[in-house]
Image (cartoon, grey):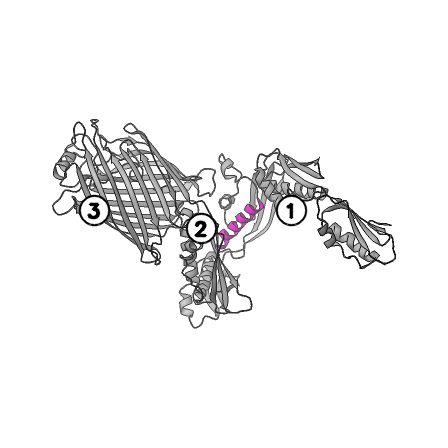
Amino acid sequence: MTLHGHAWAVEPFVLKDIRIEGLQRTDAGAVFAALPFRVGDTYSDDKGAAALRALFATGLFKDVRLEVDGDVVVVVLEERPIIASVDFAGLKEFDKDALLKALKDVGIGEGKPFDKAMADRAEQEIKREYLTRSLYGVEVVTTITPQERNRVNVTFTVTEGGIAKIKEIRITGNKAFSESTLLGQFDLDTGGWLSWYTKSDRYSRAKLNADLETLRAYYLNRGYLEFNVESTQVAISPDKQDITITVNVNEGQRYTVTGVKLEGEYFGKEEEFKSLVTIQPGEAYRAEDVATTNRAFTDRFASFGYAFARMDFRPEIDRETGRVSVVLIADPQRRVYVRRINVSGNTRTRDEVVRREFRQFESAWYDGQRIKLSRDRVDRLGYFKSVNVETEEVPNTLDQVDLTIVVEEKPTGNLQLGAGFSSAEKLSLSGSIRQENVFGSGNYLGIELNTSKYNRTLVVSTVDPYFTIDGISRAFDVFYRTSKPINSQGEEYELVTPGASVRFGVPFTERDTVFFGIGLERTEIKAGSSLPTNYREYRDEFGAASTSVPLTLGWARDSRDSALVPNAGRYQRINLEWGVGGDTRYLRSNLQFQQYWPLSKKFTFAVNAEFGWGQGLGGRRYPIFKNFYGGGLGTVRGFDQGSLGPVDNAGAYIGGTRRLNINSELYVPFPGAGNDRTLRVFGYVDAGNVWGGSEEVVNQHCSGMNWESIRASAGVGLSWVSPVGPLKLSYGEPVKSCSGDKIQRFQFQIGTAF
């Protein structure tokens, strides 16, 4: 008797044996495990039906039959074919591996059982992936090729079709602001000549939702408390190539804030909390101010240990007068302490590298400010794409939480390249290879190389940021430099300086670090056919080679919001170098200040100022090889590298003991790039020069440390965060120069800001 689907009725009997037929790959144990009966059990129709359901549910079999032979049940199976390989044809938009991963995530891949339903799911998943890239006309055909041992090769032939692009975006219902103003807030647009890079004309539901939230925030921050997006229509043309988006809005009326009230529990610290309120009575309602105040309140509660404090606000609206009173409602809930801190996602970086940046400690009261500071410190390491702190309640307790630092690793190796072209040096190259996180230890290792015809450098540096448990850093530098000052008479002479130094960094606050160190240098002046006057005098005084033992002292503070594409914040540093030993006695100082101002969502203005000063001590001459140089990248663009300042009687640019640079840049979006901050154009104005000390006998162009001697240039450039590092291209023209200045209009560099 055979049972297949609806089984024929059989009288219950005691099983003497169970046989399985038709297996090729599946383990018999898996079949026996799925059966609801065993030898010695009483077999019945209900158990047979249950067996059929259980075996089909495994997904391993195309057909299942039960045959009763006396007191023996025979399970006859036809296995589903197994996928031997998955391949694609016609791919252009996607890599094969990306689609294989997408299919694997929905249970489709090599080694999996195959059936027609699986092929349909695979086709739908592939189409879904293409829809995320605005390829709505994609077609997928599945080809099944049988192989030996009941296996199949699955090939998906993809006809991608054309990319559906946004033809039109319309906003209706707006009265207070023009449609062009509102569309300017969107990242989606109808395309431009750079859309191949930004892909801003490709429709994405996620991008549209983000733009709608931006639109909502725009209105809510200008008093329109009841603004609402009524509906959104997305229409696609019959040929699936053009998309039209229509957004219908209801602005509502504009409200002015009359006052702010506090309700709820504030532990008697109402005045302290009121000082955190950024909502201004008498001004238009701003949702951003309400959100900022709510965050400030929850952060303050968190600093008291109330990790789960809740803030709510209730607007009391008077529509007749267009006024609103904001009521802030606090519910601190319960105070908790941190039981354990975990680190997750660090596949390369060691746990200790992350943990030593944390200022929240285990078994201490939860402190939201310390946790935020800890997150920021881990983020500033620069080793991770993202850093987040997750708070989890400990089961069966009311006053404990666990913190998990979730990080996503990123490549920490860095390649920097720079180049310039001039009539003097022709093509000069500079570069460096750095590894910020060697072997996941948090240590730095870098090699810097410069192949300039006149200034060649090889520097090897290493930094241990936690040389001591208290966070004191230690750095070693070993270098070999050769310098041939630019000489109009073509004389061959050079400075050769090998040396080494060690320095330490002491963190005095979370943002302030003081550096100090000591070095040893030996500088040799190699004379050619005719040595310039300054070098000859220095060589006569100290000999062909002189040694220096410089002590260094410095301070730095960095509050920029990003090291790659700063939009706001400040960077400051002071470096002092004091020659205390060897043949030299001198003091060399350098001060730098950078400030970034966000003028709007799209525009950023930046200023960089740097001043250098050097002085000989103890009646000794200031070492000529410690001079400052100006002109070119990092100083005054538009002038040849190192060509500003004093020129000796032989026509050599020898630098000077004073240097001033002032740089300003205005960043704007690249045409067609929307609001993408990684690709921007900028206009710049640079000014500065290098001057010699009163003890130096030189011939300076436009001499004297005054306004008349300042050089200035202006130009435009391109800033791009490229895959190998931040790239800057600039083209400038001198706007204030003197006769004899060497001009270098086009310059580019990778890896530096100014």
The tag on residue 107 is 1
Q: Residue at x 33, y 37 (%)?
A: 449
Q: Position of residue 682 (x, y in %)?
A: 38, 39
Residue 193 seen in the figure: yes
The tag on residue 349 is 2
Tell me: residue 330, above or below residue 638.
below
Tell me: residue 612, above or below residue 417.
below
| Label 1 vs 3, first from the N-terminus | 1
Q: Amino acid at mark 2?
A: Thr
Q: Amino acid at mark 3?
A: Val
Q: Position of residue 506 (x, y in %)?
A: 31, 55
For residue 455, side relative to residue 99 (left or right): left
Report if residue 214 lies within the magenta region. Answer: yes
The secondary element bearing badge 2 is classed as loop
Do residues under tags 1 and 3 come within 8 Å of each other at their CB atoms? Answer: no
Residue 309 seen in the figure: no
For residue 37, side relative to residue 479 (left or right): right
| Label 2 vs 3, first from the N-terminus | 2
Q: Residue at x 33, y 39 (%)?
A: 448
Do residues under tags 1 and 2 come within 8 Å of each other at their CB atoms? Answer: no
Q: CA distance from mark 1 to mark 3?
A: 67 Å
Quickly name the residue at label 3: 549
Magenta residues, start to end: 201-220
Q: Position of residue 143 (x, y in %)?
A: 69, 35
Report if residue 597 lies within the magenta region. Answer: no
Q: CA distance from mark 1 to mark 2?
A: 32 Å
For residue 254, side relative to residue 428 (left or right): right
The secondary element bearing badge 3 is classed as strand
Circle 2 packing at 10 Å, graded few (<14), some (14-19), many (20+), is some
Out of 339 and 23, give the one closest to the viewer: 23
Q: CA distance from mark 2 to mark 3?
A: 37 Å
